[in-house]
Image: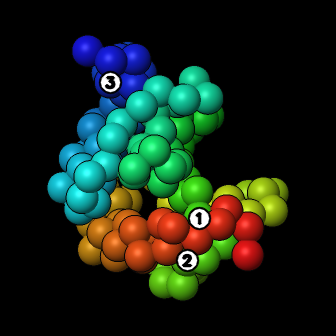
């Protein structure tokens, strides 16, 4: 088992279940995605380039998007939380996850995956 999977499995509930669900949706939605352990968190890469990350902080899970500056849909569901460029979907419970929104944001991020980090 790789360190990213260990990170996910070692989280307390309900965060472990949230992370496992997010992992499943991401891996079924985005083709050619590779889960790595970077910056001490699970980080997804496509063709060697950062795509998104999963992070358990305080009382929530963030799905952060590397090319967030280029995203165009469901921005009202995303938070910047004091960050200049990065945006994330934030979840405190499994029930908060809307798979349709998550999937559409992942597809949008996939479409802009080759753009630079910053506009």
The label shown at residue 67 is 1
Query: Disc 3 marks which residue?
Result: 5
As drawn, the label of residue 71 is: 2
Mark 1 nearby-residue class (10 Å; few <14, some 14–19, many ≥20) = many
Write the residue at 37% across / 59% down: 96
How packed mark 3 is, by other alpha carbons closer than 10 Å (few <14, some 14-19, many 20 or more), is some
Examine the image and state in which quarter residue 57 appears.
Answer: top right
84 with respect to 5 (left or right): right
Q: Secondary structure at mark 2?
A: loop
Mark 3 or mark 2: which comes first in sequence?
3
In percent of width and height, residue 52 lies at 49, 51
Residue 97's x, y, as percent? 34, 60
Q: CA distance from mark 3 to mark 1?
A: 23 Å
Question: Residue at the location (24% across, 58% down)?
Answer: 31
Q: What separation in Å lies between label 3 and label 2 (alpha carbons)?
A: 27 Å
Give residue 44's mark. none
């Amino acid at each position: 088992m790789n360190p990213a999977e260990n990170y996910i499995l070692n989280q307390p509930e309900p965060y472990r279940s949230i992370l496992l669900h997010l992992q499943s949706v991401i891996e079924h939605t985005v083709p050619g995605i590779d889960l790595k352990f970077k910056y001490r968190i699970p980080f997804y890469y496509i063709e060697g380039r950062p795509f998104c990350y999963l992070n358990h902080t305080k009382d929530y899970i963030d799905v952060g998007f590397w090319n967030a500056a280029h995203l165009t849909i469901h921005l009202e569901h995303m938070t910047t939380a004091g960050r200049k460029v990065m945006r994330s979907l934030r979840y405190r419970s499994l029930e908060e996850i809307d798979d349709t929104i998550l999937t559409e944001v992942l597809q949008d991020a996939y479409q802009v995956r080759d753009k630079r980090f910053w506009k």
